[in-house]
């Protein structure tokens, strides 16, 4: 039957094949970057609500008022820790949220700081407890855990149900 055959328009079928191909080989870096960005948003909310992002449990309040009298929220006196959070997605699908602030870990997990001396940086003496001194011995502090990074319940469902993720997987609006 040389020369015989049928002509079929497979445009709809090709759309399905393309969607399946994208779903089988999604851009893992872009998916991870999206998830990391969502974790960053979760942490921002934790700072605003002063609560653990995974459990919703409120952070332990400050034991003493701030020396400068400010009423900034907990962990946001100067905003350095909050501003230091960075997120990144990697090609293997790893999503990372973190900080380069050394003290970030003790605020996240809690712990005791070591005893240390405090010396003046710009003056000749410190004014502490009504007296002047060239140095003050600090016995250390017990810092309660105030988790600001974490994965809330249903996070995976939230991310996988997002239209942007569905589009990256090739199933959002493709059919």
Image (cartoon, helix red, strand yellow):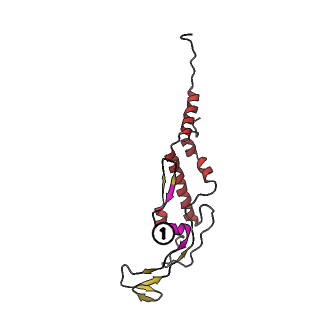
Residue lying at 48% horizontally and 69% vertically, measured from the top left: 103
> Which span of residues is magenta-colored?
96-112
In-front residue for pair 118/86: 118
- Please state, as top left, top right, bottom left or bottom right, where the N terminus lies in the image: top right
In this rendering, the answer to whether 11 lies above or below 115 is above
Total numbered circles: 1
Q: Residue at x 54, y 56 (%)?
A: 39
Q: Is residue 57 above or below residue 62?
A: above
Residue 109 on the magenta segment = yes
Percent position of residue 90, x then y? 48, 50
Residue 23 or residue 173, whichever sits in front: 23
- Is 111 a magenta residue? yes
In the displayed structure, 114 sits above or below 96; it is below
Q: Position of residue 72 (x, y in %)?
A: 52, 71
For the residue labelled by badge 1, is the local secondary structure a helix, a strand or a loop? loop
Residue at which label 1 appears: 103
């Amino acid at each position: 039957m040389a020369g015989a055959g049928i002509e079929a328009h497979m445009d709809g079928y090709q759309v399905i094949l393309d969607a399946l191909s994208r779903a089988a080989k999604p851009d893992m870096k872009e998916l991870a970057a999206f998830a990391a960005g969502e974790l960053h948003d979760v942490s921002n909310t934790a700072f605003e609500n002063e609560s653990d992002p995974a459990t919703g449990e409120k952070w332990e309040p400050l034991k003493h008022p701030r020396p400068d009298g400010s009423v900034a929220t907990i962990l946001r006196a100067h905003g350095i820790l909050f501003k230091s959070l960075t997120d990144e997605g990697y090609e293997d699908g790893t999503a990372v949220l973190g900080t380069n602030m050394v003290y970030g870990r003790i605020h996240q997990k809690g712990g005791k700081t070591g005893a240390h001396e405090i010396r003046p940086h710009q003056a000749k003496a410190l004014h502490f407890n009504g007296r002047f001194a060239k140095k003050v011995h600090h016995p250390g502090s017990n810092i309660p855990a105030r988790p600001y990074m974490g994965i809330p319940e249903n996070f995976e469902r939230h991310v996988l149900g997002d239209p942007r993720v569905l589009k990256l997987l090739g199933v959002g609006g493709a059919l």
